[in-house]
Amino acid sequence: MTANPDLQNIVFPGLKDRVVIITGAGQGIGRVFAKAFAFAGARVVIAELNESKAAAVAAEIMQAGGRALAVTTDVADEASIKEMIEVVEDEYDGRIDALINNAGIFSTLQMRPFDQIPLQEWEQVLKVNLTGPFLCARGVLPAMRRAKWGRIINIASGAVRLGRPNYLHYIATKSALMGMSLSMARELGPDNITVNAILPGATFTEIERKTVTPQQKERIIAMQCVARAETPEDLVGAVLFLASEASGFVTGQSINLDGGVTAS
Ligand SMILES: NC(=O)c1ccc[n+]([C@@H]2O[C@H](COP(=O)([O-])OP(=O)(O)OC[C@H]3O[C@@H](n4cnc5c(N)ncnc54)[C@H](O)[C@@H]3O)[C@@H](O)[C@H]2O)c1
């Protein structure tokens, strides 16, 4: 079995000094993205609901010699996003190069048949996972338009391609992000702003979760071409590329990053 990639070996040029906002970067996939961008020389903004986790990731990055700013943010709250954007623009002279819409209600979700999802939970998942990326994209737009350069990357999910049952609200929001990315790409192309979605497969982080049982994990690995568990590091190369100058003609895409589960 092959080893998972080491973050230090995933390098992409041209990201030095870029201001990159990563929502929900206090743990899991977002935390690894934050470390990867900092390692590439970018100035990373950790826009995270959990204040202490955001601060811990920023401290971890700065101890390693990187640049990071933790801003407590609730992506479901327009006023909170506005404040976060103001802090970032003040700190970095109005510059925002990339937005990674990564925050989501995910590892805390309970799996259950859709007719048993309480309406309040349905609405909260929509608010964080879909309205959040919409509001964050609106928030970064003035800075990106001023610069005539921008990258928006939405973290959708490979579960959408498989139609995984028992978390319909989650699947509905991640499907919507694909459509939103394409339409937004068409609207923002004239401003030289690209918008793409990535669809990670089942990605195993430091956070334990109940949505994938050990048996399901083995089944997923058996469906992949690359027969090992996916980790956040497996997503990093594509995300660095999509945030870079090199991807300027790649837009409106929804890219499967699942070790080949959906390869056809
Ligand atoms: N791990 C996987 O298998 C997988 C697969 C496909 C897609 N994804 C997506 O990737 C993203 C990250 O996944 P993860 O495994 O790291 O999830 P996670 O649940 O471990 O982390 C989510 C992060 O988002 C933050 N967050 C939640 N609500 C927020 C809000 N209102 N405002 C700001 N931050 C908020 C949380 O505090 C947490 O730090 C999610 O969007 C998830 O849906 C994950």
Image: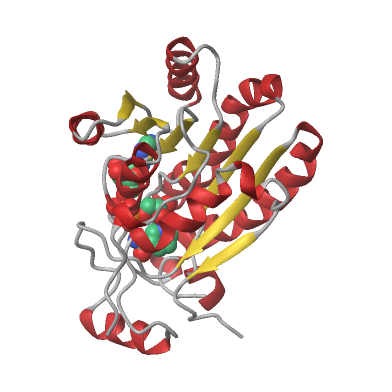
Q: Residue 137 or 106: which is nearer the viewer? A: 137
Q: In which quadrant of the rendered image does the N terminus lie?
A: bottom left
The image position of residue 56, as x and y in percent, is: 18, 33
The image position of residue 169, as x and y in percent, is: 48, 59
Marks counted in the figure total 0
The colour scheme applied to this rendered structure is secondary structure
User: Residue shown at 54%/51% (left/top)?
Assistant: 241
Using the image, determine if residue 65 lies above or below residue 14.
Answer: above
Using the image, determine if residue 178 lies above or below residue 68.
Answer: below
User: Residue shown at 63%/48% (left/top)?
Assistant: 246
Q: Is residue 165 left or right of residue 229?
A: right
Q: Residue 86 or 33: which is nearer the viewer? A: 33
The image position of residue 185, as x and y in percent, is: 73, 45
User: Residue shown at 54%/58% (left/top)?
Assistant: 198
User: Residue shown at 62%/51% (left/top)?
Assistant: 196
Using the image, determine if residue 55 lies above or below residue 171.
Answer: above
Q: Residue 132 or 97: which is nearer the viewer? A: 97
Question: In which quarter of the view is residue 131 placed?
Answer: top right
Q: Is residue 83 left or right of residue 28?
A: right
- Residue farthest to the right, as pictured: 190
Q: Residue 151 or 111: which is nearer the viewer? A: 151
The image position of residue 29, as x and y in percent, is: 34, 52
Residue 95 visible? The answer is yes
Q: In which quadrant of the rendered image does the C terminus lie?
A: bottom right
Question: In which quarter of the view is residue 77 placed?
Answer: top left
Residue 106 visible? The answer is no
Q: Is residue 41 left or right of residue 197?
A: left
